[in-house]
Image: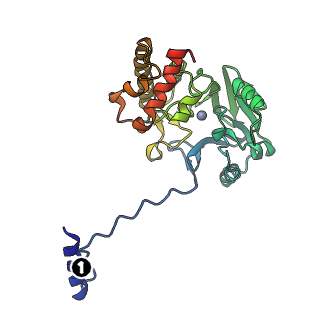
Amino acid sequence: MHNRILITLFMAAAATGLSGISLAQTPTPAPAAPPLFATTKVEGTENVYVFRYQNHQAMFVVTPAGVIATDPISYGRPQAAKTYLEEIAKITKAPVKYLIYSHHHYDHIAGGKPFKDAGAIVIAHRRAKERLAALKGLDVVIPDQVVDGKRTIKLGGTTLELIDTGRNHSDSSLVMLLPKEKIIFAVDFNALGAVPSRLAVNDSYPTEWEASLKRTLALKWDRQIPGHPGPGGRLGTREDMEKQLAFMTDLSTDVKKASDAGKCFDPAVKDVRLPQYATLQGYEQNIEWNIHRWCGYWGRGI
Ligand SMILES: [Zn+2]
């Protein structure tokens, strides 16, 4: 309906006192911004929580003997770690015994000092400790202990397995598996229904990433807590990971062909496309970065 007619009808309605009749549609309000942070108990569990701060997430597990926390997610915002600890304290008075890093990238693991000060033992992949010790990043706590291959943590009746499934989005990723709950906390190497972003492929290991996804899929889990909120805040599924693996396998095959034909980096970054994955979130923005990374691998040995 034309706007002028709507206005006329609205004025007529107002003039006749029919204020309850809505003839003109009010504009849809913009969706409210999500709160700065949120703590959510994972459905179907007794003691597994997700702490989200802006666009990052960490898992923590509450037991009578203490708390197992992961990723302080406080890069450039020290208040996030403080809030994280305050949120834990609302649930339990038990101490935080462990702080475990998913991998060494600062956006996930900077800002762990308040946890360390509270007595937590900081644990990470051996390579994460080596990298962090060399980088000496601002506000980064160097791990106290490292994981080589696999380590099992038992605390207050909860078992958490820390598993190195190989190099993927980084060379220091640990999959954290709760075998009873069949939940994993896995960060940045499985994009939920999305093409990996530029930052996700910058420090990555093509082909080894695929092998790591296969090893992760061989573990017994049903749900994945991701390091960034999934679409609508949902958790990850095995189907998400299978799709990520299929995307990477096809990407790798097609870029290898282009590379063998001498097309890397140009014109491959413009020519190679995977239309079967065009519905994945971020496809248009990120496909060239992915091709660039895989071209480096196949075409230059990088
Ligand atoms: Zn990362």
Extreme residue toward the bottom, this view: 16
In-front residue for pair 34/12: 12
150 relative position to 52: left or right = right
What sort of colour scheme is used for the picture?
A: rainbow
Residue 57 in which image quadrant: top right
Is residue 237 placed above or below 149 in the rendered structure? Answer: below
Position of residue 288 measured from the top left corner of the image (x, y, whole percent):
45, 30
Q: Amino acid at mark 1?
A: Phe
Residue 28 makes an appearance in the image: yes
Position of residue 64 measured from the top left corner of the image (x, y, whole percent):
70, 43
Within 8 Å of ligand 1, the CB of disc 1?
no
Extreme residue toward the top, this view: 260
Is residue 73 placed above or below 250 in the rendered structure? Answer: below
| Displayed-image quarter of ligand 1 | top right
Position of residue 282 measured from the top left corner of the image (x, y, whole percent):
43, 38
Write down the residue under mark 1: 10
Is residue 219 placed above or below 82 in the rendered structure? Answer: above
